[in-house]
Amino acid sequence: MNKLPNTHLLKNPLVSAVLLGACALGIGTMCLRFVLGRLDGQGTRHVPRSLESKLENHEPQSEPQMPRSTQTPNGPAPALRVIAAYALSTGRSLTRPIISGGKFWIGSSSGTLEGHSISPTKNEKKWTLRKTLPISEAPLLIPSRSIMLVTETPSTITATSRLTALQSQPPKILWEREFDGLVAISADEKSNTFFAATDVFGLWAFRLTDGSPLWQSLPPGRPAAGILVSNDTVYIPSSRQTTQSGSKARRYETTLHALSANFGNIRWSIRLPGAPWGTPIEDPFNRDVLLTTQTQERGWAHAIEASSGKLRWTWELPARPVKKSVTIASAGVVVHALESGEVIALRLSG
């Protein structure tokens, strides 16, 4: 017969008291973390956390091989002069270059954002912002303030996203915040405000220059896709899972919300079929908000009146649209690209 573990130490009053105290401390710490993660002192959702990173300034790495001019079908290529060529310190490029402050900035798979001079001098040094997650989206540039918003994107929706505001001239970190889940951002230069939406915290408005929170709104549904900001209004799609009676199939429904950019109150909402897909865009000719939604097999194109939330038209697409499918060709003409390889141009009648 197997013997039970030796438990004589538990009979010692001092040892028992120490073990009980350790258990109580661990449970109390877990509870405190849970409460702080969900609520602040006023009973609202906790403000996304502040972070601190360092911006480095150092010598550039060895230059890569220079590109060469080639022959074209119409004869020799025009003479080109290379004014700058660099190799990233680590990782591979994941974003298109953003030009700001006389430098081009580019994110990498290793979690760095590097800034190189477009016209370097002999002693020119590069700037590097080192992060922990890949920078897979090009920074959001606010040209009038020389500010870039850099997003670190996790691989799963349960992880945390990080947002860094970087001043490009002179290079300087202004502030950082951490969000639970994936985050979508947009900014309004005129009001010095940027907006961040996550599936945990809903929609937040922050002051652009210092990252301080202005307001929070929790529109019904789960915020998804991107954010459109226009004419003091924030347009954000959310998704909701639905089921039909007698069926186990999961269906998704989109709700497009229009909120006041100043206060966060909901001005109107409209329900649409399918899950959100891509970022809403504004049709400057008709003052409409254009949005696509989708399932695995098909998609829909929608036009909603920006001021009232009235549905102008919906067109069922024969296949799922690509994520950024909408292009406004001219007044009344909208072009959609589909994953099937088809391209459809729609003209508004009348």
Image (cartoon, rainbow, N blue to C red):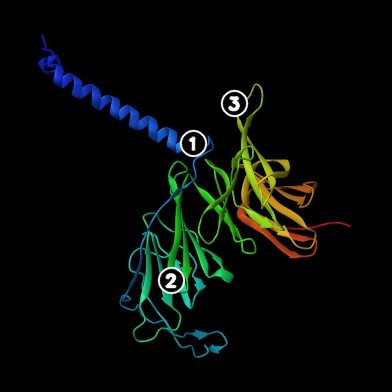
Front position in the image: 133 or 64: 133
- Relative to 268, residue 167 above or below: below
- Residue 182: x percent and y percent? 50, 47
- Residue 294: x percent and y percent? 64, 44
Q: Residues within 10 Å of mark 1 (few under 14, many from 20)?
A: few
- Relative to 54, residue 256 above or below: above
Which residue matches tag 2? 171
The reply to whether residue 152 is visible in this rendering is no
Q: Are marks 3 and 1 in contact (CB under 8 Å)?
A: no
Which residue matches tag 1? 39
CA gap, disc 3 and disc 1: 35 Å
Q: Which mark is residue 248?
A: 3
CA gap, disc 2 and disc 1: 35 Å
Q: Residue 327's quadrant in the figure? A: bottom right
Nearer to us of marks 3 and 2 is 2
Among numbered discs 3 and 1, the one appearing first in the sequence: 1
The residue at the far top in this view is: 1
CA gap, disc 3 and disc 2: 54 Å
Q: Give the amino acid at mark 1.
A: Leu
Front position in the image: 19 or 303: 19
**Residue at the image point whose x is 43% and y is 68% from the top:** 172
Q: Is residue 348 left or right of residue 222?
A: right
Q: Residues within 10 Å of mark 2 (few under 14, many from 20)?
A: some
- Residue 57: x percent and y percent? 34, 72
Q: Give the amino acid at mark 3.
A: Lys
The residue at the far front in this view is: 41
**Residue at the image point whose x is 49% and y is 75% from the top:** 101
